[in-house]
Image (cartoon, grey):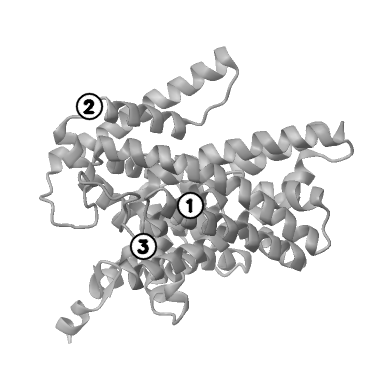
């Protein structure tokens, strides 16, 4: 009997081990002694729920081919919080950990450094330059299609673009919808920044949800037609990306730790440079973009030693397999407002515009990438992150598409694409209002 139970797994854990973990959670909850400022407790709670929900999502027919495990791990917790079906101690423990420790940035930093450190320099340069071209075209065509569909459904071009399409393509909440709402409020009389932010946030959240579903569909398409996918690569090159999924690499703890220390060191530098740029140039450049630029420059100039490149492979693998599900659960509990998400369903026209915009972005990336000699499935998944909830959206989209290796390019899509959209939308709003 015990032997049979050991063969059953919840995520990577044998069922008996998972049951011991779950028992500990239940005892802490029922006796009301759950600490709310303990990192191990917070991570333990996230592990208990996330891998179970992921397992459920993987076994739901149809949905499992559309990023089902990501949808379940992210949005079911949000619904449970909305319905008050999660214990308050659980909500507080997870929310405090997510909101006060910048866990998402830890994840992105480790993932980006691990992926880029293990890339070939020539491949990195070629892929980055091409994806920026694809991204610009996707932003333009996505904006035109979304606005056009909105006008056909009776929305004004003003309403469709500024309050539905632009928020979707703005690069998330904190660095997309927030500056967009501040910029709008500065030029629109009679509307506060809070009112504007509340009105555009649902479009951002539903756009991210649509992108997750499309990423799952693209993954399925890649499975059926292998010639359309690079399985984590954007281009076909003689010096290809290290196969981060192979699991056949010999793991060196020392080299993995070296790659992790490099990630921390570069993040130190990115935070400091962000402060200096803001203070002296009065320009805000997000730390992830600075980190990405510095890391790519170091890689292309050959300053990253071979030992760290090898460590980057195992660092990336550990981050994807060990951190992704708990982080998705944390995002669902602490950063996904179910009430905001369902508000958009009150406007059928807006729903259609959101779907049309994201589909246009994905379709454009798919078609243009073929013309540029890139893998359509992988490129479309990476670029679709520009229509997600920033870093949290990229996490969910890449997880649904099983393409976590593309996080560096997803960050390019989110940050650069978002900055272009925010700048253009505020500029156009100023022209129209004045």
Mark toward the start of the polypeptide (1 vs 3): 3
Q: Nearer the viewer, residue 193 or 48?
A: 193
Question: In this rendering, does residue 337 appear at all?
Answer: no
Disc 1 to disc 2, how far (Cα)?
31 Å
On screen, residue 314 versus residue 77, left or right, reads left
What residue would you read off at disc 1? 368
Residue 246 locus on image (x, y percent) = 19, 58
Query: Residue at the location (14% across, 35% down)?
Result: 307
Q: Badge 1 local density, few (<14 within 10 Å), some, or many (20+)?
A: many
Front disc: 2 or 3 = 3
Q: How many marks?
A: 3
On screen, residue 276 versus residue 432, left or right, reads left
Is label 1 in contact with label 2 (beta carbons under 8 Å)? no
What residue would you read off at disc 3? 228
- The quadrant holding residue 6 is bottom left
What residue would you read off at disc 2? 302
Query: Residue at the location (16% across, 41% down)?
Result: 310
Query: Residue at the location (59% across, 46% down)?
Result: 139
Q: Nearer the viewer, residue 248 or 84?
A: 248
Residue 58 locus on image (x, y percent) = 39, 74
């Amino acid at each position: 009997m015990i032997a049979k139970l050991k063969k059953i797994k919840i995520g990577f854990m044998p069922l008996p081990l998972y049951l011991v973990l779950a028992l500990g959670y239940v005892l802490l909850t029922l006796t009301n002694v759950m600490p709310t400022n303990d990192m191990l407790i917070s991570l333990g709670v996230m592990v208990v729920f996330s891998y179970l929900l992921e397992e459920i999502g993987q076994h739901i027919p149809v949905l499992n081919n559309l990023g089902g495990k990501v949808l379940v791990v992210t949005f079911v917790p949000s619904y449970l919080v909305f319905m008050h079906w999660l214990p308050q101690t659980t909500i507080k423990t997870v929310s405090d950990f997510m909101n006060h420790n910048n866990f998402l940035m830890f994840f992105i930093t480790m993932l980006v450094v691990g992926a880029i450190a293990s890339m070939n320099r020539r491949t990195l340069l070629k892929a980055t330059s091409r994806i920026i071209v694809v991204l610009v075209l996707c932003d333009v065509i996505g904006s035109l299609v979304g606005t056009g569909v909105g006008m056909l459904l009776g929305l004004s071009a003003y309403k469709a673009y500024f309050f539905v399409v632009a928020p979707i393509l703005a690069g998330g909440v904190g660095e997309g919808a927030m500056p967009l709402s501040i910029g709008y409020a500065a030029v629109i009389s009679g509307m506060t920044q809070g009112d504007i932010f509340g009105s555009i946030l649902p479009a951002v959240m539903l756009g991210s949800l649509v992108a997750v579903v499309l990423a799952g569909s693209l993954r399925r398409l890649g499975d059926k037609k292998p010639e359309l996918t690079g399985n984590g690569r954007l281009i076909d090159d003689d010096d290809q990306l290290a196969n981060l999924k192979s699991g056949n690499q010999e793991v060196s703890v020392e080299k993995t730790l070296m790659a992790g220390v490099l990630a921390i060191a570069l993040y130190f530098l990115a935070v400091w440079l962000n402060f200096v740029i803001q203070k002296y140039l009065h320009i805000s450049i997000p730390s992830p973009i600075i980190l990405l630029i510095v890391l790519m420059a170091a890689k292309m100039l050959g300053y990253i030693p071979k030992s760290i490149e090898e460590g980057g492979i195992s660092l990336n693998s550990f981050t994807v397999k060990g951190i992704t599900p708990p982080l998705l659960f944390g995002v669902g509990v602490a950063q996904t407002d179910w009430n905001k998400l369902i508000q958009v369903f009150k406007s059928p026209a807006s729903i259609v515009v959101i779907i049309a915009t994201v589909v246009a972005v994905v379709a454009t990336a798919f078609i243009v990438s073929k013309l540029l000699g890139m893998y359509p499935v992988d490129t479309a998944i990476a670029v679709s992150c520009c229509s997600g909830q920033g870093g949290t959206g990229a996490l969910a989209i890449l997880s649904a598409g099983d393409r976590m290796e593309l996080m560096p390019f997803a960050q390019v899509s989110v940050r650069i694409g978002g900055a272009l959209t925010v700048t253009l939308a505020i500029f156009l709003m100023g022209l129209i209002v004045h």
